[in-house]
Amino acid sequence: MKATHPAETTRQRILRTAFEEFYRYGFQAGSLNRIVEETGLTKGALFHHFAGKQELGYAVVDEVIWPRFQSIWVEPLEQSADPIKDLQRLLRRMADDGPGFGVSLTHGCPLNNLAQEMSPLDEGFRRRLEGIYAAWRLAFKNALANGIKAGTVRKDISPAKVAAFLVAAIEGIIGTVKNAQDPRLLREAGDALLDYLERLRA
Amino acid sequence: MKATHPAETTRQRILRTAFEEFYRYGFQAGSLNRIVEETGLTKGALFHHFAGKQELGYAVVDEVIWPRFQSIWVEPLEQSADPIKDLQRLLRRMADDGPGFGVSLTHGCPLNNLAQEMSPLDEGFRRRLEGIYAAWRLAFKNALANGIKAGTVRKDISPAKVAAFLVAAIEGIIGTVKNAQDPRLLREAGDALLDYLERLRA
DNA sequence: GACTCCATACCGACCGGTCGGTATGATACG
DNA sequence: CGTATCATACCGACCGGTCGGTATGGAGTC
């Protein structure tokens, strides 16, 4: 424990444990008692750092999911002159090393899991998650626009539309593969996505 | 009630109410007490017809979701000689009349909702839902193969790969739009999908 | 340095309420 | 009478959340 998470504050330990709990069981079915048990702390400690389950959920989005996502999907695409190549590289790495990308084959994408469950029920969740999605689409849109400027991407496509489609397709693939629990499906749908990207080249 | 659902048996009323409950709150957070209250029946009636919550959930998949899905996505595509045209028509109809397709802009796709929540937690759910997804992909794959044979679809594509990608993309679009709650996003991603379909033409 | 004061961090028993599920009985129908 | 179809009453488990209390340590005062 301490080896893998050195010098972790109590608040950070709660956040990390809560993230894993909600990732596994969903937010509503996730149990504060289990989080307390898992951290080795108590109810008192948890409620000292967070006002309630909802606040804890919000904090997981803001302080765990959002930073992880940004370092994986936003930063690598900034100042990309050949977004198609970089996107294909990102997708291949995600397929080869799902867990390292925060995406498990069986548990799917934490961002999408939370969004599908909570967005219709809690506006605070929806707004936060939508912010991440919007940043994702913006990163793709900018990268595609850069590609067009650099001459690596076809000029007749709409960066905004393609970006929206790409985000949806990626989440859709992760979701359907999570349900099938079959790497072959990941390969098939992934190949089609890579092929789609290939046809965006100038 | 009786006007919109004439001569409905008790079992059917429970199933329909349970479907709506699980569609709104998810399976785990869905409440049997609310279902009982909503139907105007009692616990005794519910447990007379279903052995428990899990069995009720399975029955909702088998007897509500699966038939609805089949009539919408499988049957219209059988014996299609121009699957691209028919697919585009289906997609446009879904975008224009979501609720009629069992897909709400704010609540998403019932099939995908259940799959994302329950597949990692319950193998019975996963197997049943995967059966529906497999049928979906098969329907698309057969339609694309028919299109190739009829000369309406490009010969150099893999029907299986494109089918897997299409299913994923559709679910992904529904999911991201559900989170954004913005019809403009549906329009953007949908346009990109229609464009992708267009480029499959022979 | 010694003492007061007080905020922070954390503990663990306990609360009301809801959950899925069960046992038993009434009613109606063959 | 027997069986199917419900209603009523109730159970234990678990839920998120509260509350009184304690240990620690830093700041201020003399």
Image (spheres, coloured by chain):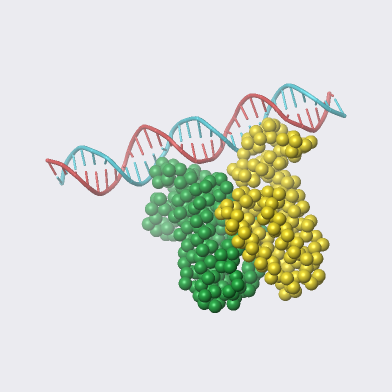
Chain colours: A green, B yellow, C cyan, D red
Residue sitting at x 72%, y 35%: B1
Kindly tell me whether residue B192 is visible in this rendering: yes
Quadrant for residue B139, please give it: bottom right
Q: Is residue A101 left or right of residue B33?
A: left
Q: Residue at x 64, y 44 (%)?
A: B22
Figure quadrant of residue A111 = bottom right
Q: Quadrant of the N terminus of chain A?
A: bottom left
| Between A60 and A2, the one nearer to me in the picture | A60
Percent of width and height locating residue B26: 61, 46
Placement of B54 over or under A97, stated as above or below = above
Q: Position of residue B10 (x, y in %)?
A: 75, 35
Q: Position of residue D22 (x, y in %)?
A: 32, 38
Indicate left or right for A36 with A112 as reference. Answer: left
| Residue at the image position 47 percent from the left and 49 percent from the top | A58
Percent of width and height locating residue B171: 64, 57
Comparing B193 with A193, the one in front is B193
**Along the line of sight, the residue nearer the viewer: D21 or B150:** B150
A187 on left or right of A42: right
Q: Is residue B66 above or below residue A104?
A: above
Quarter of the figure with the C terminus of chain A: bottom right
The count of marks equals 0
